[in-house]
Image (cartoon, rainbow, N blue to C red):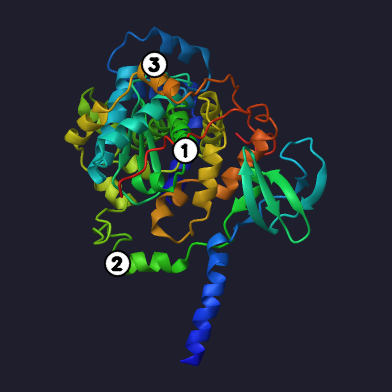
Amino acid sequence: MKINKWVLFISILFLPGIVLAAEMGTALKADNIRKEPYSDAQVTGSLVRGEKLEILSKQGAWLKIKTAQAGGWVRLLSVKRGTAGSGSQTAGLQDLASGRAGTGQVVATTGVRGLNEEELKSAKYNAAEVKKLESYTQTAKQGEQFAKSGALKPVKVVYLPEPQEGGEK
Amino acid sequence: MRVKYFILIFVLFIGMPQSFAQDLGDLLKEATKSSTDDKNTSTADASKSKPAFNLNSPSMQEEIQIGREITGNLLGAAPLVKDAALQKYVNQVGRWVANQSERADLPWHFGVIESEDINAFAAPGGYVIITKGLYRKLENEAQLAGVLSHEIAHVVKNHHLKILQQSQLLDLGAGLLGQKLGKDNKTVQNLIGSGAEICARSLDKNAEFEADRMGVVLTARAGYEPYGLPEVLQTIGQTGKDESSVALLFKTHPHPDDRLVKLDDAIGNRLDTIKEGQTLSQRFYKLKK
């Protein structure tokens, strides 16, 4: 009894901490840590590939992070969010046990099917759904109006070239 | 095994004498075209010397016919989510992004299907489908635009059409140039294989990386925060490899981590000048459940 109370007390102490815990991440590559979220800002440290870090906030293409050694801003694309290996193996097993994986059986909780190869292969044309799908179609003009209502302004951006190193054809 | 076989046939074809290859090309033309008034494509064909990848693009109507057949089969596996407001919203965002592409002329159709898998599909002619499971992972409109723009890029680049053309080639090759295919709906069905199996096929890795690069740019062109797609990739990357919801996605695509690294290589500081991209999280349509 006494122990249980202690456990409860400690749990409560830590609860806000858990809720507010910052998102964790891992460095996908070596990169500079900068003082400000700009590519010409002062370098305050560096990331080593695979290094664990804490994500504090996000601004455009940049993440504010903290590592054991340093803190500052790094490019969003240099970081993999979440703890490495998150997502459990057991989920796959549970799916297997529930009959969802492979068989495509209806799951009681969600009432939907999976989309595996077999199901896709054996799928039959559904004319009514196609008709429905096409009934939601928007014209180019309607798209423009929608953009306007959200104050979206088209920007001129050229396509990105293929990066050099992996350019096998 | 099948892939090896496929590559073998393909290599054989590449190595064929030009005249023979041309015959195959003509046969395919018969299979994919029902009209002959297509001067643009035939001159384009003549001007390029790689027959394997440039086998007569079908007319827009035929392209749409193929896409509708594939999408109809996919909808047979999982129907649309019964939420008209959601479907309309996705069409509005998708249409606006598609307007920024080279195929603004297509009658683009977007839909969210009843599946907790995390995946998205594109079919020729402007059909784009995403699963409810993927939609659930999105946090704002820029991320939705990012996901749709990747699929739009597949359509613009005819990635799936090329797969079909290649496998059609395989069939024709394997059947030793047996008989010419008819020009009716059966042709389309023959072309796409059984059901929506093409949705379970992998594209070339480079096609996926290309669609990522184009997707980021289309998202930016539409006035959104360009990093919508990479953010979604980061989210999906956190899903365990063994979870069944991503089984097909991970099987048919490079891992999100690899895609992020490739995107990073391609972007560098090229998008640094875009400062006013919007996320529009306040307008993002929330699923009912």
Q: Amino acid at mark 3?
A: Asp
* Residue topped by disc 1: B281
Kind of element beneath mark 1:
loop
The CA distance from mark 2 to mark 3 is 45 Å
In the figure, A136 relative to B193: above or below? above
For the residues beneath circles 2 and 3, the answer to whether they share a chain is: no
Near-viewer residue (A136 or B9): A136
Q: Amino acid at mark 2?
A: Ser
Q: Amino acid at mark 1?
A: Ser
Earlier sequence position, callout 3 versus callout 1:
3
In the figure, A14 relative to A63: above or below? below
Near-viewer residue (B181 or B98): B98
Q: Can residue B59 be seen in the rendering of this structure?
A: no
Residue neighbourhood size for the residue with mark 1, other residues' Cα within 10 Å, grouped as few (<14), some (14–19), many (≥20) = few
The CA distance from mark 1 to mark 2 is 35 Å
Q: Nearer the viewer, mark 1 or mark 2?
A: 1
Q: Residue at x 23, y 24 (%)?
A: B182
* Residue topped by disc 2: A98
Q: Position of residue B102 (x, y in %)?
A: 47, 18
Q: Which mark is residue B105?
A: 3
> Is residue A110 toward the left or the right of residue B99 in the image?
left
Q: Residue at x 46, y 22 (%)?
A: B54
Disc 2 chain ID: A
Disc 1 chain ID: B
Q: Position of residue A118 (x, y in %)?
A: 29, 52
**Which of the 4 image quadrants contains residue B277?**
top right
Kind of element beneath mark 2:
helix
> Is residue B4 toward the left or the right of residue A21 in the image?
left
Q: Position of residue B124 (x, y in %)?
A: 36, 28
Residue neighbourhood size for the residue with mark 3, other residues' Cα within 10 Å, grouped as few (<14), some (14–19), many (≥20) = some
For the residues beneath circles 3 and 1, the answer to whether they share a chain is: yes
